[in-house]
Image: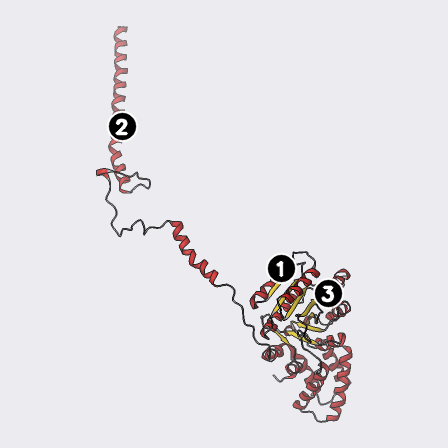
Amino acid sequence: MEIVILVVVIAVVALAAISGLVVSGRRKKAAEAEQPDTAASTAETPARTAEPKVGEEAEAPPEGARRTVEEVGLPETEEAAAEAPATAAEAAAAPEVETPAPTAGRLVRLRDRLSRSQNSLGKGLLTLLSREHLDEDTWEEVEDTLLTADVGVGPTQELVERLRERVKVLGTRTPEELRGLLREELLALVGTDLDRTVHTEVEGAVDRPGVVLVVGVNGTGKTTTTGKLARVLVADGKSVVLGAADTFRAAAADQLETWGTRVGARTVRGPEGGDPASVAFDAVKQGTEASADVVLIDTAGRLHTKTGLMDELGKVKRVVEKQAPVDEVLLVLDATTGQNGLVQARVFAEVVDITGIVLTKLDGTAKGGIVVAVQRELGVPVKLVGLGEGADDLAPFEPEAFVDALVQEG
């Protein structure tokens, strides 16, 4: 009996095993039956990395225009060909030498700009002088107006005294009479008989360039003024050599060289931190060898309180004079600094003999009286004025045009 039961159990186990194999086989066949559908869908989308086929299995080439080997260029070659014209164009478009605007009448051309920022002084004075009764309080207001415009104490007192006397004699005062009166007195104050020429002409038969030294405090626009002055001189038909003696700032030498390149002027420069006197000396030497008409030397900006730097400025001038006399020393002042600029001017005048003043940013201040004050302080004339940011906005100072801008109607 036990033997029969054992045989039955073995038979059941064997039957179960056979059934499992059959089911597994059927599942495998079902999976394989589904595989062609997946492969077919994959075949519909060409694989990116399909291997090339040969012989009868090779696919037909795509339809369209064919190119020969000669017509097909490598990507690098095509890019180079595209860049070649630009490079050639850049080479062909070398910096062109500009033709600066003529200097004649520059201040007249810019009179409108000047009057927009300056005529508050003239309008204020005319308004006060037009009052029916000119009492002491009114004359004090006239003084305050002039002092606010940086005319200075001495010149203000002189002008008020002359105005009081002439207005008293004049009696009835029409607006036109007052305007004419004020114009005459301001012209007398500014000065019409001063020599405002920038001396670049060498007297006699001496074969050397005129030498101009440009000095000033940091931030007054000294390097820019030197570049603009080069344009003024080139516009007058002179050949110019620039000396970048501001060796403390590499940017200053770069800036000056850019100004020179624009008008065809050579720039002499030295290493950053080098001896400025040496650069100035070389500039005059090269200017002489090149038979240039003028050498402009841009010196480093320095605070008037720095004794060592001021002494170095004196050294630059002395070294230059071993090569050639300095014909002009221009002090660049920022018109917006007002009376503070006079303190700076006084110290510079003690170190180098200032022969002329350049007032920058005159269009940006209503304190045009600084023209009078600085001339009185130094005993030298304002020769050039900066009236804007444009390359040709440096103009010879013309007293008549300046005063007209102060008192003109409008």
Any mark on residue 28, and which? 2
Q: Nearer the viewer, residue 279 or 341?
A: 279
The reply to whether residue 376 is visible in this rendering is yes
Is 282 rendered above or below residue 133? Answer: above
Q: Earlier in the sequence, mark 2 or mark 3?
A: 2
Q: Along the line of sight, which residue is nearer the eye, 306 or 234? A: 234
Local secondary structure at mark 1? helix
On the image, the x and y values in percent for residue 93 come to 48, 63
Q: Residue 346: give x, y in percent of width and height.
A: 76, 70
Q: Amino acid at mark 1?
A: Ala
- The residue identified by callout 1 is 251
Residue occupied by mark 3: 322
Q: CA distance from mark 3 to mark 1?
A: 28 Å
- Image point (26%, 22%), residue name: 21
Of helix, strand and loop, which one carries label 2?
helix
Q: Is residue 54 left or right of residue 269?
A: left
Could you tell me residue 399's position as x and y percent? 67, 81
Dot 3 alpha-carbon crowd within 10 angstroms: few under 14, some 14 to 19, many 20 or more: few
- Give the mark toward the camera: 1 or 2: 1
Residue neighbourhood size for the residue with mark 1, other residues' Cα within 10 Å, grouped as few (<14), some (14–19), many (≥20): few
| Quadrant of the drawing holding the N terminus | top left
Q: Amino acid at mark 3?
A: Lys
Q: Residues within 10 Å of mark 2 (few under 14, many from 20)?
A: few
